[in-house]
Image (tube, rainbow, N blue to C red):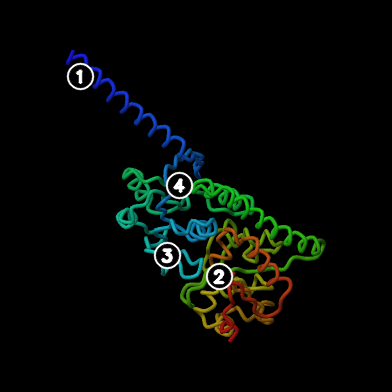
Amino acid sequence: MDIIRSNLFKSWILSVLIFILFGTLLYVLADTIEVTDAEDKVVKITSSKRIVSLNGSTTEILFALGVGDRVVGCDASSTYPKGVREKLPSVGYQYGLNAEGILSLKPTLVIGREDVRPPQVVEQLRMSGVTVLLLKEPRSFKQAKERLLTIGTAVGRSKKAEELTKSLDGDIKKLEEKLNKRKGKPKLKALFMYLRGTQTTLVLGKDTVASAMFDIVAVENAAGEIKGNKPMTAEAVVAAQPDVYVLFTTGLESVGGVDGLLKIPGLAHTPAGKNRRVVAMSGQYFSGFGPRSGKAALDLFRGIYEKDGLFVAEGEEPDKSLAK
């Protein structure tokens, strides 16, 4: 009799354990979210309670989705919302990451762009059991909305992501109305310059975010057939004869504002230089293709086609000292 009771008890315990394990498995499966990454591979996400963001536009999207309180670390390119980089622990720059620094933050989910470096870091994170979601960097509004929806799904905020895409659509519609009014009129030529003082001067040609933004607002890229980033020469700038110079606000600051910019050889001898036509935009605002990308395109259009002199747009309050 005791043996029978013992076996019955063991059977009962085993049944309870199986029930608990099965229930836990069902809970995990029900709570798992599946999204597709840059390589069209399915990424299974079981938790987004502790997120590390590996680039600025991802950080901006996460805060716009209302999950900023889950972000436990970000990279050095995260400049929006204002003060986020100072508030959160830094994992370095997205092209110079180390696994130890990221793992020390105990993330359950790491999100970044597909070209983060070094690639070994991504493998180390995955081998440590961390879910990593890498996405393509958008070069169009369509791609921007797709990334926004993917991240929204990944963190359980699909509805909020849809609201943000609708808001973006509203800005796109405003831009389309402006573009329709310009149909049949000649395009202006703009030259995007990446500056870090007078020692680092590059022009951005095809296959760059600057070229993508110029296409969106119907502006001709004065860099012509140049691909990627190339060193700027005075002769090439004068030959290009741009109507407007476009650059990041930090770049304009680094050369001392418009006066300092026009002291760089060749820049004063173009229509843009003679008319002091400069559009300066915050780097993340201009190139992030995040929730504010429609507003950024509108500002770029205004700066090139509707304003004279210097036009500054940061997605926040402009720095008037740049006009000096």
Q: Nearer the viewer, residue 88 or 250?
A: 88
Mark 4, residue position:
133
Q: Dot 2, how many residues are within 10 Å of its Cα: few (below 14), some (14-19), or many (20+)?
A: many
Q: Identity of the amino acid at label 2?
A: Ser
**Residue 191, horizontal then vertical, whole percent:** 62, 69
Q: Which of the 4 image quarters holds residue 87?
A: bottom left
Q: Nearer the viewer, residue 309 or 166?
A: 166
Mark 2, residue position:
282
Q: Residue furthest left?
A: 2
Q: Identity of the amino acid at label 4?
A: Leu
**Residues at discs 2 and 1 in contact (Cβ within 8 Å):** no
**Residues at discs 2 and 4 in contact (Cβ within 8 Å):** no
Which mark is first along the chain, 4 or 3?
Answer: 3
Which mark is first along the chain, 1 or 2?
Answer: 1
Q: Where residue 76 is drawn, which disc sits there? A: 3
Q: Where residue 136 is drawn, which disc sits there? A: none
Q: Is residue 256 left or right of residue 25?
A: right
Q: Dot 1, how many residues are within 10 Å of its Cα: few (below 14), some (14-19), or many (20+)?
A: few
Residue at 57% from the left image edge and 75% from the top image edge: 234
In the rendered view of the protein, which quadrant contains the N terminus? top left
Distance between the Cα atoms at labels 2 and 4?
A: 26 Å
Q: Identity of the amino acid at label 1?
A: Ser
**Residue 101, horizontal then vertical, whole percent:** 32, 58
Marks 2, 1: nearer the viewer: 1
Which mark is first along the chain, 4 or 1?
Answer: 1
**Residue 198, horizontal then vertical, whole percent:** 49, 78
Residue at 51% from the left image edge and 39% from the top image edge: 40
Element at badge 1?
helix
Marks 1, 4: nearer the viewer: 1
Residue at 49% from the left image edge and 61% from the top image edge: 56
Mark 1, residue position:
6
